[in-house]
Image (tube, rainbow, N blue to C red):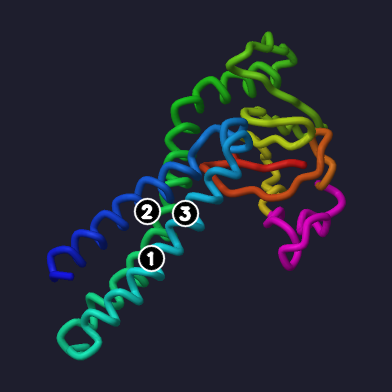
């Protein structure tokens, strides 16, 4: 295999990874659930082909590893970079989506603080509770699993960091906040001010 062919395969593999790892985390919740098995298969196939490329480059350039070492390692380096891209892109898309709706969220909060409950609409649903007003704006969900933006002036939802030791059912959210908004609070990430993006189950 010629050098240009090896590099071409690596470029193609990287471009596929950019699309897969950057776009997949930002799919709407329901769509991600529906095509989840296909996404998993695509990720596994991509990883497998990356390992194949490493082996191919080792065989092709193993006798000249000092010169071609970076080329041999490049799939591994690119794979790590793609995971970083996946996480960063998900947060960036989430933040821009929040900023687009933030004025509407704040208008609802102001109305509720004045004792006036704005009408619920398909594009802007909310759940309000607590003496110190806290509001959830559900966005995506299926059955009792949902995610959305949460306004918490006490910032207590910050304590929800996912599962303890990665084991479902073992919540990091303290018991006093775990049942807020009628679900089990799993994890929250800070958006801006007292706003958070949270996941419930």
Q: Is residue 42 left or right of residue 150?
A: left
How far apart marks 1 and 2 lie (CA) works out to: 10 Å
How crowded pointer 3 is (Cα within 10 Å; few <14, some 14-19, many 20+) is rated as: some
Q: Is residue 18 left or right of residue 162?
A: left
Which residue is denoted by mark 2 in the rendering? 17
Q: How many marks?
A: 3
Q: Which quadrant is the N terminus positioned in?
A: bottom left
Q: Which quadrant is the C terminus positioned in?
A: top right
**Secondary structure mostly seen in the magenta stretch:** loop
Which residue is denoted by mark 1 in the rendering? 50
The foreground one among 93 and 59 is: 59
Relative image position of residue 186 (x, y in whole percent): 73, 49
- Is disc 2 placed on a helix, strand or loop? helix
Instruction: Kindly indicate whether the residue at mark 1 contacts the one at mark 3 (C-beta within 8 angstroms).
Output: no
How crowded pointer 2 is (Cα within 10 Å; few <14, some 14-19, many 20+) is rated as: many
Relative image position of residue 152 (x, y in whole percent): 68, 39
Q: Which mark is residue 24?
A: none
Which residue is denoted by mark 3 in the rendering? 87
Q: Is residue 37 left or right of residue 181?
A: left
Q: In the figure, residue 129 lies in which quadrant?
A: top right
- Which residue is painted at 50% across and 23% down in the image? 103
- Is disc 3 placed on a helix, strand or loop? helix
> What are the residue bounds of the magenta stretch?
159-177
Instruction: Kindly indicate whether the residue at mark 2 contacts the one at mark 3 (C-beta within 8 angstroms).
Output: no
């Amino acid at each position: 295999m010629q050098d240009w062919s090896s590099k071409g395969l690596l470029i193609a593999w990287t471009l596929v990874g950019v699309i897969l790892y950057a776009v997949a985390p930002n799919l709407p919740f329901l769509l991600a659930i529906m095509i989840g098995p296909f996404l998993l298969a695509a990720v596994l196939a991509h990883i497998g082909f990356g390992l194949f490329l490493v082996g191919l480059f080792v065989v092709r350039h193993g006798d000249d590893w000092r010169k071609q070492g970076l080329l041999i390692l490049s799939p591994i380096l690119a794979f790590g970079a793609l995971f970083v891209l996946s996480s960063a892109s998900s947060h960036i898309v989430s933040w821009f989506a929040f900023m687009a709706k933030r004025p509407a969220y704040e208008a609802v909060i102001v109305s509720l603080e004045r004792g006036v409950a704005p009408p619920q609409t398909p594009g802007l649903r909310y759940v309000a509770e607590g003496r110190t007003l806290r509001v959830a704006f559900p966005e995506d969900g299926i059955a009792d699993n949902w995610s959305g933006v949460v306004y918490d002036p006490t910032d207590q939802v910050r304590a929800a960091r996912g599962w303890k030791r990665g084991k479902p059912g073992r919540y990091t959210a303290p018991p006093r906040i775990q049942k807020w908004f009628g679900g089990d609070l799993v994890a929250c990430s800070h958006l801006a001010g007292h706003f958070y993006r949270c996941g419930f189950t």
